[in-house]
Amino acid sequence: MEESKKQILAEAGINVTKALNSFMQMEPMYEKFLNKFCLDPSFENLEQAVEVKDEDLAHLSSHTLKGISATLGMEKLYQLLLEQDNHFKKHEFEAGYDMLPQIKEEYLKMIEAIKK
Amino acid sequence: MLQNDLSAMTLEKGTILIVDDNELNCEILSIIFSVHPIIIASNGKEALDVIRKKKGELDAVLLDYLMPQMDGLTFLEQVKEEKLLSRTPIFLITSEEDDTLAAKAFKLGVVDFIKRPLSAFIVQKRVESIIELYQTRAILEKLLEKETKKVRDFGRGLIKTIGAAIEDRVKDSRVHSHNVRALSRILLTKSEVGKNLTHQEISEVLEAISLQDIGKLSQDSILHIDSDHPNKEQQEEISERSKKAIMLLTDLQKVSHFKPFQFARDLAEFQKDNMEGHYFSEKIGHQEIPLWVQGVAFSSMIDSIIANSGKSGKEGFSEALKRVEEGEFGEFNSHLLKAVKENLDELQAVYG
């Protein structure tokens, strides 16, 4: 992975060094999964679930996205999803749904950084 | 020798089952554990199907918590209920921070709780160490089983040799032991007389039958008793012999912890108690005496009565039983007599 790419990711708030620990320091594999993140349906599922207030799907999608963002070093996105996941666990579904705009903003920031 | 056996057994890389609905997580774990064959299940239900088919081949299960259809905890409950994975470690790998979840998972049998994001090196070491521990334990259990069998076989050989030496000392003793064993086998395996013994213990009791007379080996001469009601001198001799047997069998049991010696000692104790009362005293019906001891003692008594009566075959058996029922030899445990009646045909068949 080029240094300039790492720089872009770091500026977007992605902890590349920490994330590489999950990938046994294999940068090409990390890069591959960053690209896969852009195609992963979890965020789309979350948006749809919030729209139709599907509690189970919303919780599952949020939880999955939380795990992926943690693994990929997306720390802010992870924190937001952690908070949302906790709301869902406590059955505070409206509070969880209300977090979607913030999550979307951070998610799109990640996509933009990866695609740059 | 044990060390040689242990070194000869190599630790092979078995399959790792990854249970996670997320492709990214599965792929990362597959790479971390690429030296193992990998099977991926995307939820608890799929994982259960894999386990039911391949449980003997699995080295470990790496389990996510939240999954569609069946989550990690429900999967663990099912595994526990069906006792599917007692010899395979299960790791819960999750981004959950909740300690209550960890506590529940440990209670349901996971061996480790690994939090995401993973550090590949650490997760690899933690999982591989525990896999190695489980494999080593399995190998040691197999070796222990092998060594235990050797000791048991040696013990059996020893008992047979001692038994043969005892039987050789008294005329017709071999036939008597054979008959007592046959009668006891029926009572112990086919009635409640053997209800407190396992299948293995019943075999050991049968092996122990000749041993109760081990005291005969230390006697210069042995009185031949051909009466159903031995006189005082005969009673004293049997009592002395039983005491010697108890001493010898206690020592043998102490050094070997081999159950047939304990069983033979129980029989000798009973014989001694009897001789301090009557030959076939009412003590045989005493509730405190284990039913299996009474069953073996009863078998021995019946065979002696038949031998002393000079009558053979089914007729001899029926007559001996009639005398018992008429009370000639005192009171008997009702459960024992019930067991005899229920298995009458088979018991008679021992005598042709």
Image (tube, coloured by chain):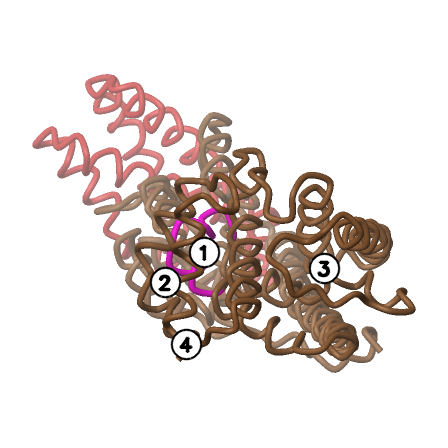
Chain colours: A red, B brown
Residue name at image x 30 percent, y 19 percent: A90
Q: Position of residue A94 (x, y in %)?
A: 19, 18
Identify the chain of the residue marked 2, using the numbered disc in the image: B
- Select label 4 or label 1 by which is in front: 4
- Select label 2 or label 4 by which is in front: 4
For the residue carrying disc 3, how many other residues have a C-alpha within 10 Å: few (<14), some (14-19), or many (20+)?
many
Query: Which SS type dominates the magenta stretch?
Result: helix
Identify the chain of the residue marked 1, using the numbered disc in the image: B
Q: Residue furthest left?
A: A52
Q: Are marks 2 and 1 on the same chain?
A: yes
In the rendered structure, find residue B85 and report the number of the disc placed on it: 1
Identify the chain of the residue marked 3, using the numbered disc in the image: B
Residue name at image x 21 percent, y 34 percent: A58
- Select label 1 or label 3 by which is in front: 3
Q: In the rendered image, is residue B150 in sight? A: no
Q: CA distance from mark 2 to mark 4?
A: 58 Å
Q: CA distance from mark 3 to mark 4?
A: 26 Å
For the residue carrying disc 1, how many other residues have a C-alpha within 10 Å: few (<14), some (14-19), or many (20+)?
some
In the rendered structure, find residue B313 and report the number of the disc placed on it: 4
